Amino acid sequence: MVREFTVVIEQDEDGIYVASVPELEGCHTQAETLDELNVRVREAIELYLDVMSEEDNEKHLDFIGIQKVRVGV
């Protein structure tokens, strides 16, 4: 079975790329390059799904979107 996940990629102040998977709570990783990040996020998703299948806990969220919100401070 093939599943597709949305990955949010950000870059921190040190230039490190950080990826998170909104549909999989707590599933995230980081790397110095986008190529390395792509490999690592696939590994993180696979490991997450392995653990979830062992726990037999199928909590699933459908990704809807990302938006920026401005707030005056």
Image: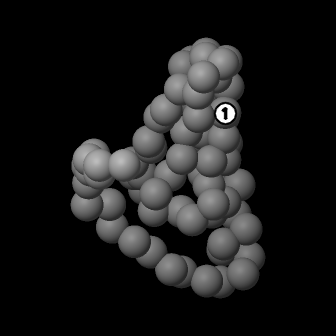
Task: Tell me if I can see residue 39 in this picture.
Answer: no
Image side of residue 13 versus residue 63, left or right: right
Q: Relative to the observer, which residue lies in front, 20 or 49?
A: 20
User: Which residue appears at 61% of the width and 83% of the height?
Assistant: 57
Q: How is the image coloured?
A: one colour
* Tally of marks: 1
Q: Is residue 2 left or right of residue 15?
A: left
Picture layout, residue 56 above or below residue 6: below
Give the percent coordinates (x, y) of residue 71.
29, 51
Amino acid on which the number 1 mark rests in the picture: Gln
Which type of secondary structure does the marked residue at label 1 adopt?
Answer: strand
The x and y percentages for residue 50 are: 70, 63
Above/below status of 15 relative to 58: above
Q: Which residue is denoted by mark 1 in the rendering?
A: 30
Q: Is residue 64 left or right of residue 28?
A: left
Q: Residue at x 49, y 32 (%)?
A: 10
